[in-house]
């Protein structure tokens, strides 16, 4: 069973908005999953991207996995084919040198 709700908020400067959100039954599907490495350990901060798999592929959303490698995406359009890509950068990062 999926539950959902949405709303808009436009806070003013220095304002704290307090709200209660009531969730309602939602028939639309969702995708939940866990990203693990080759040893079966959860992968934190892996980039998960969602595309509609029509031609041309249309980006839908992107998110990062949590500390347990979990991600959740939805709601989705029932019957629509999606292409999901997962990417985790290596620790070998080179700083870009700026020229003068």
Image: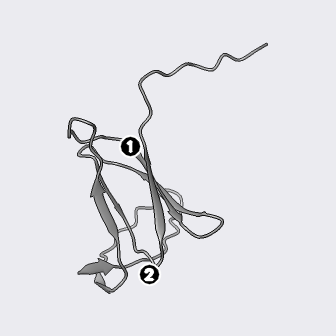
Q: Residue 46 carries which label?
A: 1
Instruction: Please say which color scheme the image uses.
Output: one colour
| Relative depth, front residue between 38 and 3 | 38
CA distance for labels 2 and 1: 27 Å
Name of the residue lying farthest toward the left: 40
Give the left or right position of residue 88, taking residue 41 as reference: right
Give the left or right position of residue 37, taking residue 61 as reference: left
Q: Quadrant of the N terminus?
A: bottom left
How many callouts does the rendering have?
Answer: 2
Q: Which is nearer the N-term, disc 2 or disc 1?
A: 1
Q: In the rendered view, would you say 90 is above or below 26?
A: above
Q: Is mark 2 on a helix, strand or loop?
A: loop
Q: Quadrant of the C terminus?
A: top right
Q: In the rendered view, would you say 57 is above or below 63?
A: below
Q: Name the residue under label 2.
A: 79
Marks 2 and 1: which is nearer the front? 2
Residue under the point 28% across and 58% down: 33
């Amino acid at each position: 069973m999926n539950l959902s709700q949405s709303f808009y908020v436009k806070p003013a400067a220095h304002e704290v908005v307090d709200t209660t959100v009531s969730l309602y039954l939602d028939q639309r599907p969702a995708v939940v999953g866990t990203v693990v490495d080759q040893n079966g350990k959860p992968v934190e901060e892996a980039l998960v991207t969602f595309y509609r798999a029509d031609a041309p592929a249309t980006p839908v959303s992107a998110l990062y996995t949590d500390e347990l490698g979990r991600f959740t995406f939805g709601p989705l359009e029932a019957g629509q084919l999606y292409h999901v890509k997962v990417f985790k950068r290596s620790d070998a990062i080179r700083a870009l040198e700026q020229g003068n």
